Image: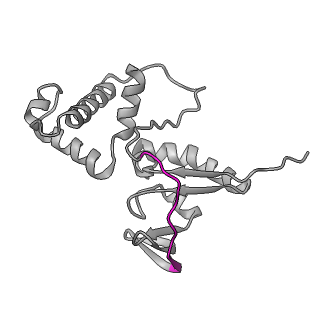
Amino acid sequence: MHNEQVPKLFIFDEASSNAGGSGKDGYDTKTKLGPLTYKIRKYGGSLIIIGHDGRDVHPLVRELGVCVHKEGLKEATFYEDVRNRKGVNPIFSVSGIPETDWRYDDKEPTTWSWSSGEDDDDEVDPEDLSRKLAIYTVITAKESEPDRPNHEIADFVPYSAEWVRQRWNEYQDNGKHRNVVGEVTELTA
């Protein structure tokens, strides 16, 4: 039986938030993204997995790929491997990368789930849900009133003003917690 494959491209931005190499994320990445990566490659697909540096995505994914370090708006270097969070064994460099007309909302709080939908466990971890709601509260409060003091926002969550500051900085500086905002928005919509 012949099945003509159409080229596919999978772009996974903020992979470090959900495809890290340790803990539950590490386990999920190894058992779910690993096999998916092999299948995508087998059928001629391409993956672009974006992290903050060369070591914040799972080692299994790094083994199968090439590291690209974007050095500027129009320059990038491709490396065989990553050591100590730096590319090693350069393959080649490119410059003069043209502008793209492809636009996307980099603030969109898209959710990510490793679930296939079939093996969903309806049981909710109350601690996890409480933390997610607190993060959502911090981010939505800071977005609507950026000058509001952290100690005032801390009155609405079971955490300190310092915790509020840290979560807001993680969101603002690294894009962390976007999936949490999307998840809570989806639950409450």
- Which residue does the image show at 39% across and 71% down from the upper left? 72
Colouring rule applied to residues? one colour
Dividing the picture into quadrants, the one containing residue 74 is bottom left
- Which residue does the image show at 38% across and 59% down from the upper left? 52
Magenta stretch: give its range: 90-105
Name, please, the residue furthest toward the right.
1
Q: How many marks?
A: 0
Residue 163 horizontal side relative to residue 18, left or right:
left
Q: Where is 14 relative to 155, above or below?
A: below
How far across and how far down the image is residue 11, in percent? 54, 51
How far across and how far down the image is residue 54, in percent? 43, 64
- Which residue does the image show at 45% across and 36% down from the upper left? 111
Residue 92 horizontal side relative to residue 46, left or right:
left
How far across and how far down the image is residue 124, in percent? 40, 21
Looking at the figure, which quarter contains the N terminus?
A: top right
> Quick check: is 95 in the magenta stretch?
yes
Tell me if I can see residue 78 in this picture.
Answer: yes
How far across and how far down the image is residue 189, in percent? 40, 20
Q: Where is 25 relative to 158, above or below?
A: below
Report the predominant secondary structure element of the magenta stretch: loop
Dividing the picture into quadrants, the one containing residue 166 is top left
